[in-house]
Image: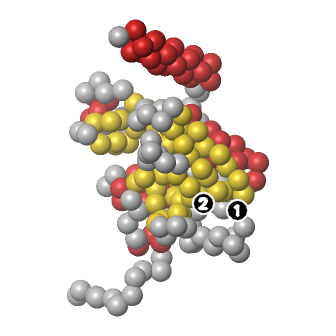
Amino acid sequence: MLTLSDSIPCDPNDRPFPIVRVSTNKPLLAVITTSKPLGTRTHYWGQRTVPCTPPECGACDAGVAFRWHCYATCFDHRTQLHFLLELTAAASESIIQYGRDHGTTRGCGIKCSRIPAVSNGRIHIQTTPTDPNKYPIPSEPDLAVLLSRLWNIPLSEIQTPNRTVIIPEISVNRIEEKIQREKKREHARGNGRKDL
Ligand SMILES: [Zn+2]
């Protein structure tokens, strides 16, 4: 039997969550609704981001490199959009740290910018607690359910140990070196243009 409803679902898990990435032209302002962000290794394969699913992973078999991505649901009070934010490991560090400091990331106000403002610029996130009376947020969706729908993987096949995000070992020095190299390259390009 088909059941039609004249009201939108109250349960946030019944709604679609668009994925939002930080753009280059303006900062993203929102409040996190997830109490614990979740992350996993992903591949960019078939022109989309897909999770790495060992031991049977088509992208791994095809030799596609993986990256760790963090996911958190966020609410934008200006647009009233409840969305899924996708972040790299380095970008997610500040919100993970906020979670450690406050015991939850829910209610954490974020301002995300790309520095430099180019499509592959590093994402910088400023965090600040928000007043739930002034900025009420929707109830917390089940992040694992959302990701299982996004990637079409049964929930029973998704492991969520304590729903805790484990940031993979990344060398901060290596990241900083990369930023410095990119800055030098940008600078060299700028000098090149001046010489023309
Ligand atoms: Zn894989």
Q: Residue furthest bottom?
A: 6
The amino acid at mark 1 is: Thr
Measured as percent of width and height from the top left, residue 44 is found at 33, 36
Residue 153: image tag = none
Element carrying mark 1: loop
Check disc 2 and give the amino acid type: Val
Looking at the rendering, in which quadrant would you find the N terminus?
bottom left
Let me know if residue 141 appears in the view: no
Q: Earlier in the sequence, mark 1 or mark 2?
A: 2
Q: Quadrant of residue 129?
A: bottom right
* Viewer-closest of 186 and 30: 186
Quadrant in the picture for the C terminus:
top left
- Circle 1 packing at 10 Å, graded few (<14), some (14-19), many (20+), is some
Up-down relation of residue 34 to residue 134 (above or below): above
Where does label 2 land, which residue? Answer: 31
The answer to whether the beta carbon of the residue marked 2 is less than 8 Å from any atom of ligand 1 is: no
Query: Residue 194 placed where, x, y %?
Result: 42, 13
Task: Specify the quadrant of the image occupied by residue 175.
Answer: top right
Residue at the image point whose x is 54% and y is 34% from the top: 115
Q: Quadrant location of residue 146?
A: bottom left
Name which residue lies at 58% across and 39% down.
124
The Cα–Cα distance between marks 1 and 2, rounded to whole angstroms, is 8 Å
Which of 149/90 is in front?
90
- Residue 56 at x, y percent in the picture: 31, 37
Q: Position of residue 7 (x, y in %)?
A: 39, 87
Q: Circle 1 sits on which residue?
A: 130
Q: Are marks 1 and 2 in contact (CB under 8 Å)?
A: yes
